[in-house]
Amino acid sequence: MRVNKTDSPIGRVKCVVNTCQYYSNGDQCTAEKIEVQSRNAADTQETDCATFTPKG
Ligand code: SF4
């Protein structure tokens, strides 16, 4: 899911994925919105951020 980058990080979300193009210093996410998958996940390992895009 490709979304716009914003100037204000998402509140109440800590993300440590520093290889994502939306990652910002302080473990913040600057994507305008994020999507977390997947439905019916049974544990932590089965969830992830579908908005992740590698730094280009
Ligand atoms: S888009 Fe997802 S992986 Fe990327 S910084 Fe935001 S929360 Fe982290």
Image (cartoon, rainbow, N blue to C red):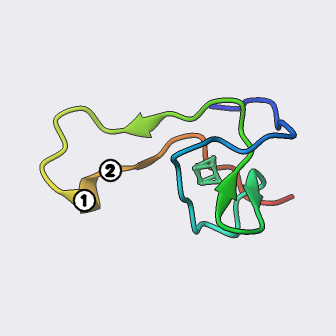
Looking at the rendered image, the quarter that the N terminus falls into is: top right
The picture quadrant where one finds residue 37 is top left
The residue where tag 1 is placed is 44
Q: Quadrant of the C terminus?
A: bottom right
> Which residue in the protein does label 2 denote?
47
Label 1 crowding class (10 Å Cα cut-off): few <14, some 14-19, many 20+?
A: few
Q: Which element is circle 2 on?
A: loop
**How much space separates mark 1 and mark 2, taking CA atoms?**
6 Å
Which residue is located at x 24 percent, y 59 percent?
A: 44
Horizontal side of 4 relative to 53 (left or right) equals right
Disc 2 residue type (three-letter): Thr
Residue extending farthest to the front is: 11
Q: Secondary structure at mark 1?
A: helix
Viewer-closest of 20 and 11: 11
Asked whether disc 1 touches disc 2, contact meaning CB atoms under 8 Å apart, the reply is yes
Q: Position of residue 42 (x, y in %)?
A: 12, 49
| Farthest-out residue, left | 42
Q: Position of residue 20 (x, y in %)?
A: 70, 59
Q: Quadrant of residue 24?
A: bottom right
Task: Give the vertical position of 17 relative to 5 (above or below).
Answer: below
Name which residue type carries label 1: Thr
- Location of residue 17 (image quadrant): bottom right
Q: Is residue 47 left or right of residue 3?
A: left
Point 71% across, 30% down: residue: 32
